[in-house]
Image (cartoon, grey):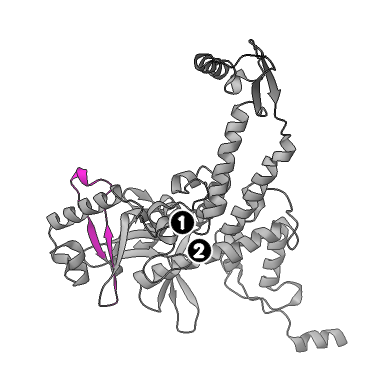
Amino acid sequence: MGLFDAIRDNVWPTVTVADKQAAQAAREARLMNAVVPSGSVSRGSEVFMAFTGDMGGGLPTLTEQTAQTVAAINACVKVISGAIAVLPMNTFRRQQDGSREQIYDDALWWTLNEEFHPRWSSAAGWTFMARSRLLHGDAFAIIQRDPLGRIRHLKPVHPRRVEVYETPQDRLVYAVYPVNAAMGSAVEVYDQDDMLHVPGDGFDGIRTPSPLRYDMLVAGAGAVATQEYAARFFANGARPDFVIQSTSGASRLSDEQFINLKKQIDEAHGGYARSHRPMLLEGGLEFKSITMPFEDAQLLQTRQFQVEEIARIFGVPPFMIGHNEKTTSWGSGVEAMGTGFVRYTLRTHLHAFTNEINRKFFRQVSKFAEFDTTDLERADTQTLFNAFSVALGGQGKPGFMTESEVRRKLNLPELEGGEQIERGMTALQQTGAANA
């Protein structure tokens, strides 16, 4: 029985290593020999894109590698994945009165905050999974448990190595292919309870559409084409195009003369290091420039617009990736945009991760994990201290935090007797004091 038949019939744990290696060999052959079907399939169609990732129109194919050469895409991915990687993820126990109690002695905290896997630090693991979700739509990590079923490690897996299948029992099964079958390893199959699968926008119950092929297809491919043009433009000394033509009465160049002239021009004037050299012409030839002012090309304006468009796709304020125009166009400016990034962009990603972790790790209401975004949302020092003053019961108003709680927020040691809440004066006492 083949691997895929076994997954369909829900007997995949009994498949032999030889069957798994055969499945890997078949997959590699399918990828190596993938061709675009002829006939009714047109360039730019869904089927064409499924095989090639090419939208047509002469734009370059956008892949993970080419996308990361675009500074704006790379910067947006770094901002989001870096923000997720530095946030602590804490585990809590929910009390019957609705309050929460943080769990400090849970071994899962070490996995989520320090070491995903013996080969992966947690910071590297969160960064990898966030980048996978941003560029490919889905993030995957194998959940490794000890003999008692307790979670011990998370092993991130590149989305291109994973194929997802739906079983007749309405469950998902994940086939994880090795990087190279020639190394002797075989495809491994995991039940959905043993795979952390964090989907993105457009999830259909199995996979998420790749942002490289949809969200960023035009903007990203256009940015790649523009920067390649800019590189060639400046590598050639930012020199306008020109023609070399024969003057009236000059004889036509022979094939040999034409080839020699072309070779001399390439050798003497090609590339940035050879730009602006005087050109020596003979035999009735003259040089004629084709004027194309740099402003008309609008290269810089085009690239600036692409930065804004890519930032818009990722939901990142342009100033956070070094684009400093129009930084006061929202609210009170940069500070408001930074707060908006945390609330409307980052929280979307954080919720996707916490939702999948809670449903796969705990499966109960009493325990849950949550990212601590306090540092990202913390205001300036004066505003922060004014807020804590109100929380402690300043200006005669009732407080709602203890000194110990405030000191914990500031990562300061607790003081003896700091567990009392300052109630302040009641409304009746305030009225009496005013009439006295």
Residue stretch rendered in magenta on the structure = 169-190
Provide the secondary structure element on which disc 1 rests.
Answer: helix
The residue that appears at 76% across and 61% down in the rendered structure is: 332
The residue that appears at 75% across and 56% down in the rendered structure is: 328
Q: Where on the picture, by quarter, is residue 362?
A: bottom left
The residue that appears at 64% across and 21% down in the rendered structure is: 244
Instruction: Give 408 or 171, whichever is nearer the viewer.
Output: 171
Tags 1 and 2 touching, CB below 8 Å:
yes
- The percent position of residue 173, horizontal first and vertical second, equals 27, 67
Q: Is residue 154 magenta?
A: no
Q: Amino acid at mark 1?
A: Ala
Q: Amino acid at mark 2?
A: His
Residue pointed to by mark 2: 349
Image disc number at residue 130: 1
- The percent position of residue 394, horizontal first and vertical second, equals 73, 71
Q: Earlier in the sequence, mark 1 or mark 2?
A: 1
